[in-house]
Amino acid sequence: MPPAAAEPLTPERILETTEEVLRRYGPTKATVVDVARALGVSHGSVYRHFPSKAALREAVTERWLARTEVRLREITAAGDRPAPDRLEAWLEALFDAKRHKAGDDPELFATYTVLLAENSGVVETHLAELVAQLGEIIDEGVSEGSLAATDVPAAARAVFDATGRFHDPQYAAEWQSPTIGAEFAAVTALVVRGLRP
Amino acid sequence: MPPAAAEPLTPERILETTEEVLRRYGPTKATVVDVARALGVSHGSVYRHFPSKAALREAVTERWLARTEVRLREITAAGDRPAPDRLEAWLEALFDAKRHKAGDDPELFATYTVLLAENSGVVETHLAELVAQLGEIIDEGVSEGSLAATDVPAAARAVFDATGRFHDPQYAAEWQSPTIGAEFAAVTALVVRGLRP
DNA sequence: CGAGTGACAGATATTGAAATCTGTCAGCCG
DNA sequence: CGGCTGACAGATTTCAATATCTGTCACTCG
């Protein structure tokens, strides 16, 4: 946390520093004053760029979720692979990403879980994007005849709901269980079988 | 809460009264002294029958979960109905029971959710029983040729995991959504399709 | 004799006063 | 002028003193 040179104070820099401060102090202790101090400015300056602490935390949350969306988009857009393959790969990528985040740095993960809980609107948008990506994959599967679904958006949503245990942070504690891999494989297999033509 | 006549003090009476006190005061305020007062005895007497407050609360939790197990057992044991039917009916019965408990008396439901969180051992046994019941239904479906599964216990577990959104109390808030019925139907259909021969 | 009591010690929860934080804004300074 | 400051009021959090609860046990009383 370098006391920061006289670079211009941008929303981007504030967000980066806020993430750092959240990582260091945790969600309950991190204050706007801490962020301002890390940036070498007064806390009043932070309020020039974000109307409230809540808005600042919300923006951090959005940034974080956007990173996951981009990663998964790569799989969604891999139009050359058969849809059932992509579907499994997508679900596994989501699970792996979450499991590693939760396992590698549980405190940071807990911090973000708190942020998610206080920004349900942002989370809803994020979940809608993920379900939309699933919908794209299923849609292509239906076109190429490798998957079946009468109502594609509903099917996408069902796939997402059915695999909740492997991406909902509420279950993070169970992701360390030695049997979790088998459970994930079983649910994924069941779901993909359920979409067979 | 009648101050209670001079009936003999049994574990059963203590459990009933503890449930009442929990209902009335909630999980954080209900004390052993409250239970004793409601029974018209000293709190020392309660400790003759239960070694600790934790054990008392655990016993209440067990009783509560046992009631659900008995209700679902009726569907599991209805051997005349085809297995896919029973499977759907069982899942719907579980969801309906939980949803109504959560909707009719949210405070009481919250109380029990707290109790479940502090008695993970009891909950684990309960979940194992539910998965075992699912296993029985699937097993019979495999025998009669109406369902397919290479590893029945794993399939039972997968069905249970995939429908978690509709029985895990963590999701209780979402059970009031107007679209929850459609979501349940979609996941159930997907799962049952996944078990087709 | 044995179910029940109630005073007690240590653990836990509550409360309110003090400290800190959030959000504003008049003014400073480059 | 315009980005930044820092003192301030009201909201929130912290902390330590106080009150309550848990669990024990020597005792009572039917």
Image (spheres, coloured by chain):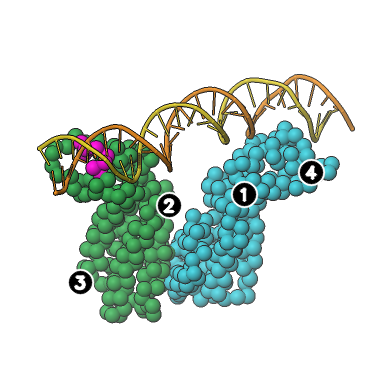
Chain colours: A cyan, B green, C orange, D yellow
Where is mark 4, residue-wise?
A: A3
Tell me where the magenta segment starts and ends, as one range.
Answer: B39-46
Q: CA distance from mark 1 to mark 2?
A: 22 Å
Q: Where residue B170 is drawn, which disc sits there?
A: 2
Identified at 75% across, 34% down, the residue is: A42
Dot 1 alpha-carbon crowd within 10 angstroms: few under 14, some 14 to 19, many 20 or more: many
Q: CA distance from mark 2 to mark 4?
A: 42 Å
Q: Is residue B33 visible?
A: yes
Dot 4 alpha-carbon crowd within 10 angstroms: few under 14, some 14 to 19, many 20 or more: few
Report the chain holding disc 3.
B
State left or right for residue A58 relative to residue B60.
right
Q: Nearer the viewer, residue B174 or A194?
A: B174
Q: Position of residue A168 (x, y in %)?
A: 50, 57
Report the chain holding disc 1.
A
Q: Could you tell me the amino acid type at mark 2?
A: Gln
State the SS at label 2. Answer: helix
Q: CA distance from mark 3 to mark 2?
A: 34 Å
State the SS at label 4. Answer: loop
Q: Nearer the viewer, mark 3 or mark 2?
A: 2
Where is mark 3, residue-wise?
A: B80
Q: Position of residue B82 (x, y in %)?
A: 26, 72
State left or right for residue B51 relative to residue B8.
right
State the SS at label 3. Answer: loop
Q: Are marks 3 and 2 on the same chain?
A: yes
Q: Could you tell me the amino acid type at mark 3?
A: Asp
Looking at the image, is B58 positioned above or below residue A152?
A: above
